[in-house]
Image (cartoon, coloured by chain):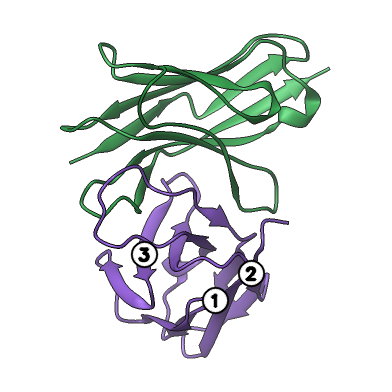
Amino acid sequence: AQSVTQLGSHVSVSEGALVLLRCNYSSSVPPYLFWYVQYPNQGLQLLLKYTTGATLVKGINGFEAEFKKSETSFHLTKPSAHMSDAAEYFCAVSDHRQAGTALIFGKGTTLSVSS
Amino acid sequence: ETGVTQTPRHLVMGMTNKKSLKCEQHLGHNAMYWYKQSAKKPLELMFVYNFKEQTENNSVPSRFSPECPNSSHLFLHLHTLQPEDSALYLCASSQGERLRRGPPYEQYFGPGTRLTVT
């Protein structure tokens, strides 16, 4: 069975500092991996995804993530945090039981950004 | 605005009530999903509809009953709920899948309905 573990339920950074949100996955088949962001009182929005090809994936709002098969990781980074990045972030892996539709999500990491 | 709307945004109901949540997508998609988001727990997939056919029921109690009358609308009918059912219920849509196995299409989420069961 596939699963996702997000290390750290809450991460705090200063504005301008590096953002690093950790995600490790478990999958018996090559995974499809995703990062979603949820702002207060809103639904989830796709930040970026890895399917095949280049292991460094760039997304919206300056975020990127690197797929590392040897470490079963897909950590999310951003070089310089903005106040507007404060939100909850979810890592997800595609559930291969379905024909490519269902996602399995981690518990989420809340990112706080201080000035 | 993602093109997926949900009503109502907030709902308070007693354990003996019957209510329905509504989701509508304006994106021309053919797959729709219900998720449950509880505090401190991962987002839980409840139901999947692909081209109006239910393709996933993730061991959801029968007090939750989905309905998908067409590709643009999805309902979640609620009856005799329990306090532990209080959560944010999210609807999502994506392009539909027909047999092909491969990378999933992007899911677009609505803002959710905050449900409180008293």
Is the residue marked by circle 1 packed among few (<14), some (14-19), or many (20+) residues within 10 Å?
Answer: many
- In this rendered view, identify the residue nearer to me: A3 or B56: B56
Please, which chain is the residue tagged with disc 1 on? B
Please, which chain is the residue tagged with disc 2 on? B
- Image point 70% across, 53% down: which residue? A41
Q: Earlier in the sequence, mark 2 or mark 3?
A: 2
Rendered shade, chain B: purple
Q: Which chain is green?
A: A
Q: Earlier in the sequence, mark 3 or mark 1?
A: 3
Across and down, in percent, residue A2 comes to 23, 39
Q: Vertical placement of B83 versus A86: above or below?
A: below
On residue B46, which mark appears? 3
> Extreme right residue here?
A115
Q: Vertical placement of B87 versus A110: above or below?
A: below
| Residue B24 left/right relative to A66 | right
Pick the quarter of the image with the N terminus of chain B.
Answer: bottom right
Q: Are marks 1 and 2 in contact (CB under 8 Å)?
A: yes
